[in-house]
Amino acid sequence: MTDADRLGELPTPQLVLDEARMLRNVARLRARLAPHGVSLRPHLKTVKSVEVARRVLAGGNGPATVSTLQEAEVFAAAGIPDILYAVGIAPGKLNRVLALRATGCDLSVILDSREQAEAVAAASRAAGDPIPVLIEIDSDGHRAGLRPDDPALPAIGRILHAGGAALRGVLTHAGESYGVSGDEAHAAFAERERAAAVRAAETLRAAGLPCPTVSVGSTPTAHAARNLDGVTEVRAGVYVFFDLVMAGIGVCSTDDIALSVLATVIGHQRERGWILVDAGWMAMSRDRGTATQAVDQGYGLVCDAEGRVLGDLVMSAASQEHGTLSLRPGSTKVLPELPVGTRLRILPNHACATAAQFGDYAVLPAEAGAPLARWSRFGGW
Amino acid sequence: MTDADRLGELPTPQLVLDEARMLRNVARLRARLAPHGVSLRPHLKTVKSVEVARRVLAGGNGPATVSTLQEAEVFAAAGIPDILYAVGIAPGKLNRVLALRATGCDLSVILDSREQAEAVAAASRAAGDPIPVLIEIDSDGHRAGLRPDDPALPAIGRILHAGGAALRGVLTHAGESYGVSGDEAHAAFAERERAAAVRAAETLRAAGLPCPTVSVGSTPTAHAARNLDGVTEVRAGVYVFFDLVMAGIGVCSTDDIALSVLATVIGHQRERGWILVDAGWMAMSRDRGTATQAVDQGYGLVCDAEGRVLGDLVMSAASQEHGTLSLRPGSTKVLPELPVGTRLRILPNHACATAAQFGDYAVLPAEAGAPLARWSRFGGW
């Protein structure tokens, strides 16, 4: 039974997940990290699905990272007991954190300021529940976090430790690693993550503070790290599905991309070299992450219904519900003949963004011959 | 009662709709078109909400345009009887079109090829239900449609008319009008829409074919058209909420933008001039529609909780759940002091894309002192 047969008459556009590719991606990172003796805490912001989480987490319910309290609540309700909410905590969200912790979930938070630390300590004391906290460290100037040598670091540690919260350690994320290409460059960012986090941990310990967890990671650095001495856990998210941005910086190939959008040809502008499909940016998302890479994939790279890349055909423009397919500029190929009604699969620039546009996955199960499955996704905050 | 009071402790990020601004925008276009004697068929792809549709459509359930069959189904179930599905029809969707028509909704479709016309005619005959069709005309090279002088136009008209479908007329959309600024430039595109649609209608009529409907429109052209002779209806969508892209081309001011995203400050990188909030691209969407305009608004323009623009502060970068606010390059202003926990409202580049990231609107009712309301939105296809 071919993929096209299994996809049958599915209305388009529809998000499609190739489970075999996903399981291969999951196994690859597990194998990559095993010799390092660190634990893997996958980031579930990409998948937002309990069915996918079961296949990604160690033992089906191992440690997880999330980007919203909604994710924490859904995954905790599914019995996942150890969840890190990895966006700097807003004091107004602490009641919700405490309510979820009261259900038995070991939910931890991150922060990088005295104001946040004081709010978390006060909330911990008021509830009689020491909220576990990782202090966020800035290893690459990407976004949030304290420099590892910032004198505020031990001060914040003391506010937490003495104030009634549970100081659990430090965390960093080298988001800038997405902007460089190749294993050497990613390994250098991995070492920056490691060095910054370990140095911060040493600073806390030198101040007599606990720091059991040293958490690092991003998909590029997790696949390239050579030395993880002093690190206790690695986080990564998009590796589960991979995408064109990750292929563009050499972390995967397009054959590893487990996510695509099924679309139908609805028209042609032949003299302009355009093929129109019923998937626009509402389906693909507005993400143009490959625009600044060596190969610009437009809004996505076009495959046939079996998932085979069709040469240089990309979604070069998108309106809300229209995608315009054309050959990549400079291509010497001939525009393929794709009549109205032809079904195609389009690989996304950014799996997190494209998946978020859909309420479920149409799953091509890894088991040969198994019929299409549907796995639900959730959204919101 | 201030807006900030009405928004109270609402969890962030949250989509906020200012009903008074929305009603003003709706009234403005109605008044603008009234002297022209054309009907207005608002595009509901922006709003995706029955509560909003009631306030936008003539008499609460007048003619509507949609971009997906899901929209058609939801609005038809709400009793809206006349709906145009304005994306080129895929033959595989005709069963769903017929099923919805069988419930009593006058659902019409659009197309621009013989293959589609033959499929619609065959489906109409098989069902004994003449599916109403507008032929799509290309007035500006933007996307789909036949040139008004394409010999395929009368041929397609005949396939439909003789084949059992209901040829209802022609439709065009000058999507390129979004790329030019100012009333004169938009009026020129409005005239291109009118001229192309009227010429196509004359071609059909000269061939002995019916063409009762001549449908044109986009938000910029609808607000600028000077002569609508020969046009029977105008379509527009984003005008209901407006957004920074529309402000950037002079169709509205930032004070007209009815949609914003409520967010909370979660951190600072003071030496870099950054303020971090808990709304990233998952909340704002990845739309960067102002990137190519005279004023680049980043991922959004920052207002205080009352909706007042805070000078030159924009969301200059976004991750999935983090927004980085900074002063626009070249600004002479001072970064405002916004402590952790401060609540802000961020105006979107593109209302359609930002609204699509949320499951509901928190509505600031037009009635003074009325408490916050919640209106649901839907998504999917």
Image (tube, coloured by chain):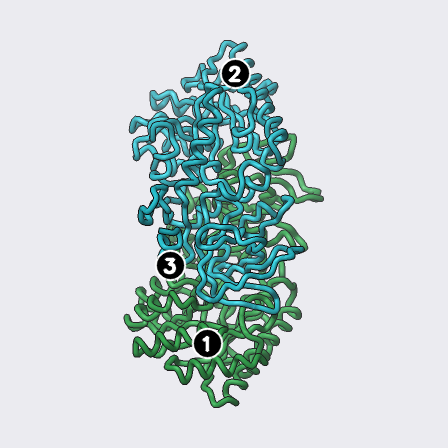
Chain colours: A cyan, B green
Instruction: Report how far apart the C-alphas of labels 1 and 3 lie in the structure.
Output: 23 Å
Q: Can you identify the residue that label 1 sits on?
A: B134
Q: Are marks 1 and 3 on the same chain?
A: no
Residue B303 against residue B101 in the figure, above or below: above
Residue A242 against residue A91 in the figure, above or below: below
Closer to us: A38 or A45: A38
Closer to us: B333 or A197: A197
Q: How many C-alpha atoms fall within 10 Å of the one at disc 2: few (<14), some, or many (≥20)?
A: some
Instruction: Report how far apart the C-alphas of labels 3 and 2 lie in the structure.
Output: 50 Å
Secondary structure under tag 2 reads: loop
Please state if A55 lies on the left or on the right of B3 as rendered: left
Q: Residue at x 66, y 38 (%)?
A: B334
Q: Can you identify the residue that label 2 sits on?
A: A230
Q: Are marks 1 and 3 in contact (CB under 8 Å)?
A: no
Give coordinates of residue B144: x percent, y percent. 54, 68
Give coordinates of residue A103: x percent, y percent. 29, 29
Q: Amino acid at mark 2?
A: Gly
Please state if B246 lies on the left or on the right of B321 as rendered: right
Q: Quadrant of the C terminus of chain A?
A: top left
Q: Residue at x 51, y 46 (%)?
A: B345
Camera-side mark, 3 or 2: 3
Please state if B17 lies on the left or on the right of A248 as rendered: left
Q: Amino acid at mark 3?
A: Pro
Q: Earlier in the sequence, mark 3 or mark 2?
A: 3
The subunit carrying tag 3 is A
The subunit carrying tag 1 is B
Q: Can you identify the residue that label 3 sits on?
A: A11
Q: Is residue B349 visible?
A: no
Q: Amino acid at mark 1?
A: Leu
